[in-house]
Amino acid sequence: MQIPAPLERLVEEFSRFPGVGRKTAQRLAFRVLSYTPEEARNFAEAIVRVKEQIRPCSSCFIFTDNDPCDICSSSSRERNQLCVVEQANNVLAIEKSGIFHGLYHVLNGAVSPLDGIGPEQLTVPQLRERIRRENIDELILATNPTVQGEATAMFLQHEFEHQVSRITRLARGLPAGGDLEYVDDVTLSEAFSGRQPF
């Protein structure tokens, strides 16, 4: 059976999501078909609204509807600690653990020379300026424990070792090749508590 063109287009769009294969995309598309016209409209409006109203914070690059974001504008955060992560969803995982009360900087990726991604394609230039401008004592490198994450952490350590008092890396216990988004609260909390000088 050939799928009608509008449905096929929806399947293709869902397939573009990370980790969503064709079968899952078809299930999602058929789920949308079961929506009432009002539910479908609400779903479409939510997508449009998020694209119109959510943007990166001009300071830390977390996705927000306020600029600066709630974390950057909070007076209760420890402003001398800066946790560097690869993606905005890593911040959600760390915040959920409740262990860290400093500020963040989202790189929007990791250094990957084979993919043509160097520091200048990330938010490293903004991080340089931020460290120069703000009174950061500790830089916490919370990149993922992947080859690219390790390369990024090593680059950042060399780049900023003379500009901040202390550079630490999350303790091991995080799975090698893993992603912070999928780490449970206890493991993440222990990784923060056991961080080591880098």
Image (cartoon, rainbow, N blue to C red):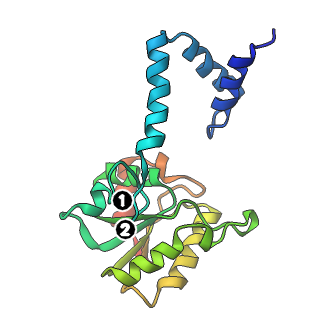
Nearer to us in this view, 59 or 103: 59
On the image, the x and y values in percent for residue 78 come to 24, 69
On the image, the x and y values in percent for residue 60 come to 40, 64
Residue type for callout 1: Glu
Q: Image point 59% across, 69% down: which residue?
A: 150
In the image, which disc is placed on residue 190? 1
Nearer to us in this view, 29 or 98: 29
- Indicate the secondary structure of the residue bearing disc 2: loop
Label 1 Cα crowd, 10 Å radius (few <14 / some 14-19 / many 20+): some
In the image, which disc is placed on residue 194? 2
Is residue 70 in sight in this rendering?
yes
Q: CA distance from mark 2 to mark 1?
A: 6 Å
Q: Image point 42% across, 88% down: which residue?
A: 163
Toward the left, the furthest residue is: 76
Toward the bottom, the furthest residue is: 162
Toward the right, the furthest residue is: 1
Nearer to us in this view, 163 or 126: 126
Label 2 Cα crowd, 10 Å radius (few <14 / some 14-19 / many 20+): some
Q: Do the numbered discs 2 and 1 sit on residues whose CB atoms are within 8 Å?
A: yes
